[in-house]
Amino acid sequence: MVSNNLYTKGEPDPDLLIRTSGELRLSNFLPWQLVYTEFLFIDKNWPDFTEEDLDNAIIEYEKRTRKFGAN
């Protein structure tokens, strides 16, 4: 019921969230949709985030084992 009333209705939940600027918080960004999302925190500001940084983020994500809440 909650998902059907969000502005992201019909969109898949994110698999990876890249948080730039070195901040270690979400700032209340998509709290419901990010429940099983993998987080990557980058100590670089958004304008300086490059295609190479994105490639490295994807490589890091591929190394992770997704648990979806399980131990």
Image: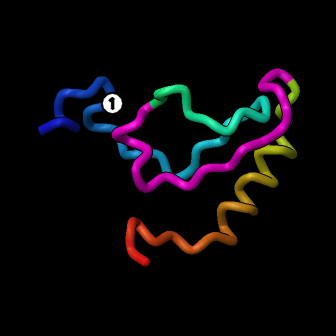
- Residue at image x 56%, y 33%? 26
Q: Is residue 58 left or right of residue 3?
A: right
In the image, residue 23 sits, relative to residue 14, either above or below, namely above
The residue closer to the viewer here, 55 or 5, is 5
Determine the secondary structure under disc 1. Answer: loop
**Image quarter for residue 25?**
top right
Q: Is residue 26 left or right of residue 24?
A: left
Q: What crowding class fits label 1: few (fewer than 14 Cα within 10 Å), some (14-19), or many (20 or more)?
A: few
In the rendering, at what x and y percent does residue 46 appear?
78, 25
In the rendering, at what x and y percent does residue 40 appear?
68, 49
In the rendering, at what x and y percent does residue 57 appear?
74, 52
In the rendering, at what x and y percent does residue 53 appear?
83, 44
Looking at the image, which residue sits at the far left?
1
Q: Quadrant of the C terminus?
A: bottom left
Q: Is residue 61 left or right of residue 13?
A: right
- Circle 1 sits on which residue? 8
- Residue at image x 82%, y 26%? 45
Callout 1 amino acid: Thr
- Residue at image x 69%, y 71%? 63
Q: Say if the magenta span includes residue 54.
A: no
Q: Tell me how the rendering is colored.
A: rainbow
Give the main secondary structure of the magenta stretch. Answer: loop
Magenta stretch in the rendered image: 30-47
Total marks in image:
1
Q: Say if the magenta span includes residue 35.
A: yes
- Residue at image x 66%, y 61%? 61
Q: Quadrant of the N terminus?
A: top left
